[in-house]
Amino acid sequence: MNKTSRQLTKRGASRRNNSNQRSDISHPPQINGLELRHSTTLRYRMTASAAQGITFQNLLDTMLVATTATAGTNLFQTVRIRRVRVWGIGAVGTATSVWVEFAGTTTGILGDQAIHTDTSVGVQPAYVDCRPNSKCLASEYQLSSAANAVTISAPAGSVVDVELSFRSGFSSGNAAVQNALVSATAGQQYLRGLDGLATATSNFVPEYTIGQI
């Protein structure tokens, strides 16, 4: 058999093998991710010094759609925290401290039992960059509830970045917003403070000014 004949024989065998491999697939491949998913970083400016706890309900209330002029629904059903960063504004001649704690607890799960803190003197901001560990409530997707997700302590003027991941399925409805809206337009999407309050009264005002309510 010459070289050309051998090459033709190999090509024919290859085609038959490929044909057999294709016929082994009895159904379309599995796909995942039909649920709605969204990950983003939300930035806030603190209007007053505080050590304030943020609940999962607060986190879900940050992004909503109005159903009436005074009522709204969360855009998503569940939320988890991926990262929190805080810049505490400095002041000449005095110390500035910030701290963050993922203190949410349930039976058998006590959070990460760690306080992430930093102190600065002068114009350099105090800075904390932290993530919840795998044993924290904040690291897992949670429904709207009054359970603590994170506690943030910082002076007025501090900048807070919160990296969040949201999900929604189709087996249940989204929770209603806790605090009433004022003069909202039904069907429009809005932003609220990190504490779930209207931006006019929130201690955590969103950086993006359009769509606040």
Image (cartoon, rainbow, N blue to C red):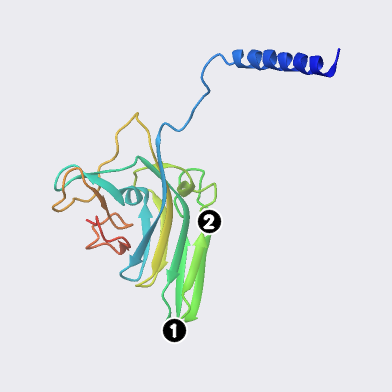
Instruction: Tell me residue 145's x, y (percent).
Output: 34, 45
Question: Residue 87 lies in what quarter of the image?
Answer: bottom left
Q: Residues within 10 Å of mark 1 (few under 14, many from 20)?
A: few
For the C terminus, the image quarter is bottom left
* Classed neighbour count for the residue bearing mark 2: other residues with Cα under 10 Å, few (<14), some (14–19), many (≥20): some
Q: Quadrant of residue 210?
A: bottom left
Residue in the foreground of this view, choosing between 26 and 81: 26
Q: Secondary structure at mark 2?
A: loop
Residue at 14% in and 47% down: 69
From the viewer's perspective, tell me whether residue 192 is left or right of residue 117: left
Mark earlier in primary sequence (2, 1): 1
Above or below, comparing residue 203 to residue 40 in the picture:
below
The amino acid marked with disc number 2 is Gln
Residue located beneath label 2 in the image: 113
Image spot of residue 189 (x, y percent): 25, 48
Q: Is residue 139 left or right of residue 182?
A: right
Query: Disc 1 designates what residue?
Result: 94
Quarter in which the N terminus is drawn: top right
Q: Position of residue 19 (x, y in %)?
A: 64, 14
Q: What amino acid type should be assigned to the residue bearing mark 1?
A: Thr
Residue visible at 46% across and 75% down in the picture: 125
Q: Nearer the viewer, residue 157 or 113?
A: 157
Across and down, in percent, residue 157 comes to: 35, 72
How many discs mark residues in the rendered view? 2
Mark 2 and mark 1 residues within 8 Å of each other at the beta carbon: no
Residue at 50% x, 74% y is 119
Q: Quadrant of residue 205?
A: bottom left
Q: Secondary structure at mark 1?
A: strand
Disc ID at residue 130: none
- Give me the C-alpha separation between circle 2 and circle 1: 29 Å
Please determine whether, in this image, residue 196 is positioned above or below residue 29. Answer: below
